[in-house]
Amino acid sequence: MRKVTLLGASGSIGTQSLDLFAQDKEHFLLVGVSVGKRVEKLEKIFLDFPSVSFVCVQRKEDYLRLKNIYPKKHWYFGDEGLLSLIEESDCDMVENALVGFAGLCPSVRALECGKILALANKESLVVGGDLIRDLLAKGKGELYPIDSEHVAIAKLLRAVPRDQVEELLITASGGSFRDKRREELEGVTPNDALKHPTWSMGAKITIDSATMMNKGFEVIEAKVLFDFPLEKTKILMHPESHVHSLLLLKDGTYLADVSAPDMHGPIAYALYEGNLAYELKHVKSLGALAPFHFYEFDPKRYRAPGIALEAFEKGGTSRAVLNGANEAAVYAFLEGRTSFLSIDDLVEEAVECLPCIDNPSLEELIRADKESRAFIEAKIGG
């Protein structure tokens, strides 16, 4: 039995993970959760999972109130509380379903503590990929990705020798505005952007899907996870979102991972540490995957992936700047303080203007994240 601490239990990935834990209580024992500000979710979690004894919330006032209501549980709050939760909850596995930069330090701490890390937090790999690779190389913990694209790649690479692979193809739906030209996006609203055509996700990742910054992040994640040449990792437009990733083999054929756009499957693959039965579809052409459709990625229509990869190539703290600026710009858009099209411009300017420190420590990444957010706020405020 795996004893699990779930970070981000109140979000989209966390809620779907709770479904899976409830379905297999012989394999999983949920011992700890974090819920951020959404403390109203705790009552049901405690009812469904009496085994939860360790709980972290974001605000101190919630911590003070709830520890009096539930005195037999161990309570924590804030960013430091997340780290204490990981250390003290006596878990074997940490599932990190946090959103944004807040997930980086918990990912690092989980591996430092020798935990199995089921990782849905993109930013951990985009910003701290070098730190995480170093920890794994030293035998600190294990990592299983939850992103559907990287679960697909992991499955596909188990089916064929790497020297037979020509390209990794990461599919992209195109997001909420995939049927619009860039010049048609001038006045779009947050409500418009949050209407994803195929996936049900949280607000931040839905906006990242609309700009396709998420695909830039996913190419970076693939490099960190699988160490495949960056120039051979491509984005392929696929509006139906049923084919999550493909391998183009050197003989010109394709291996594909195909399933409905539902995160329960990728989450389960990570939670069961890759020990799930699955079938891969091997086809001679993309047309053989009909009725699905595939289109070439247009970097002029979607600027964000190119900005992300430029920051990745620049290296060092530029990756923290990339992520911090993107988070700040996306939330500013969601709050109605900047336009949709300005997100790319703001992030690009931050990456170009802010200093880059090579081989950064975790503390230097944290500082770069704060500086990038301050840069964006100054630009929007100005």
Image: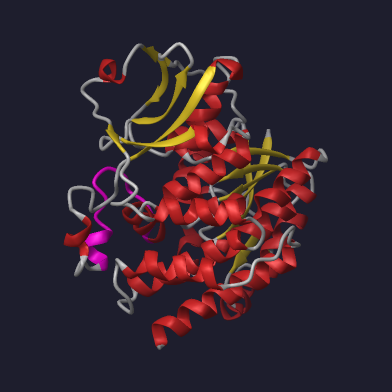
What percent of the width, then of the height, locates residue 80?
A: 70, 69
Quadrant housing the N terminus? top right
Using the rendered view, name the quadrant where residue 76 is placed: bottom right
What percent of the width, then of the height, locates residue 129?
A: 65, 49
Foreground residue among 58 and 201: 201
Q: Quick check: 5 left or right of 244?
A: right
Q: How is the image coloured?
A: secondary structure
Residue at 55% across, 57% down: 311
Quadrant housing the C terminus? bottom left
Residue at 75% across, 40% down: 136
Q: Which residues are magenta?
A: 190-203
Callout count: 0
Using the rendered view, name the quadrant where residue 248 is placed: top left
Question: Is residue 191 on the magenta stretch?
Answer: yes
Foreground residue among 169 and 206: 169
Residue positioned most to the right: 138
Question: Is residue 275 on the magenta stretch?
Answer: no
Q: Quick check: 379 left or right of 340?
A: right
Residue 296 visible (yes or no) = yes
What percent of the width, then of the height, locates residue 322?
A: 53, 62
Q: Is residue 63 above or below residue 298?
A: below
Residue at 44% across, 44% down: 16
Q: Quick check: 153 left or right of 273?
A: left
Magenta span: predominant SS is loop
Residue at 50% across, 22% down: 166
